[in-house]
Image (spheres, grey):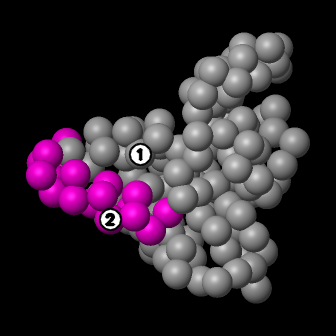
Amino acid sequence: MKIFLDANVLVAVLNREYPLFTYAARIVSLVDHPRFEVFTSPICLAIAFYFAEKKSGTELAKNKISILSKKMKITRIDSKTVDLVSENPAIYDFEDGLEYYSAINSGCEIIITEDVSDFYFSEMQVYNCISFLENLK
């Protein structure tokens, strides 16, 4: 199963933000499970770095992002992705649109985010961390 992790899931793990950390860390750990391919986008990594740097400093934040990017698969965002977002009148938040189409172009089946309503336009399943883990049972 291919899953896409939004920036807020990564931030919760990198900054150990409780109570979400407990659930988000379990989801990120799926990178080591053979049943899952875990993706994120370059934009999500940049957002996660920004917040990790504020909390932990530049050097530690870079190390954390480096570890994540070696374990996770990174989606591609190119001119085709930009065009798809621009041409979709249902998408108002450009960043969310880029994440969505980069996930689709990578074959992801599910988006995991704490801002489920941001992906109101999605044709794939969107879960928050808790609901995703409940559906795994």
The residue wearing badge 1 is: 45
Q: Which amino acid lies under the numbered mark 1 shown in the image of this protein? A: Leu
Disc 1 packing (10 Å; few <14; some 14–19; many ≥20):
some
User: Is residue 130 visible in the rendered structure shown here?
Assistant: no
Of 122 and 120, the residue lying toward us: 122
Is 66 inside the magenta-drawn segment? Answer: yes
Of 133 and 67, the residue lying toward us: 67
Magenta highlight range: 54-72
**Could you tell me which residue is drawn at 50 percent across and 63 percent down?**
72
Q: Position of residue 42 (x, y in %)?
A: 47, 41
**Could you tell me which residue is drawn at 67 percent across and 74 percent down?**
36
Above-or-below relation of 107 to 16: above
Magenta stretch secondary structure, dominant: helix
The residue wearing badge 2 is: 67
User: Would residue 27 appear left or right of 100 to someone viewing this image?
Assistant: left
Q: Measure the alpha-carbon separation of dots 2 and 1.
A: 11 Å
Above-or-below relation of 107 to 54: below
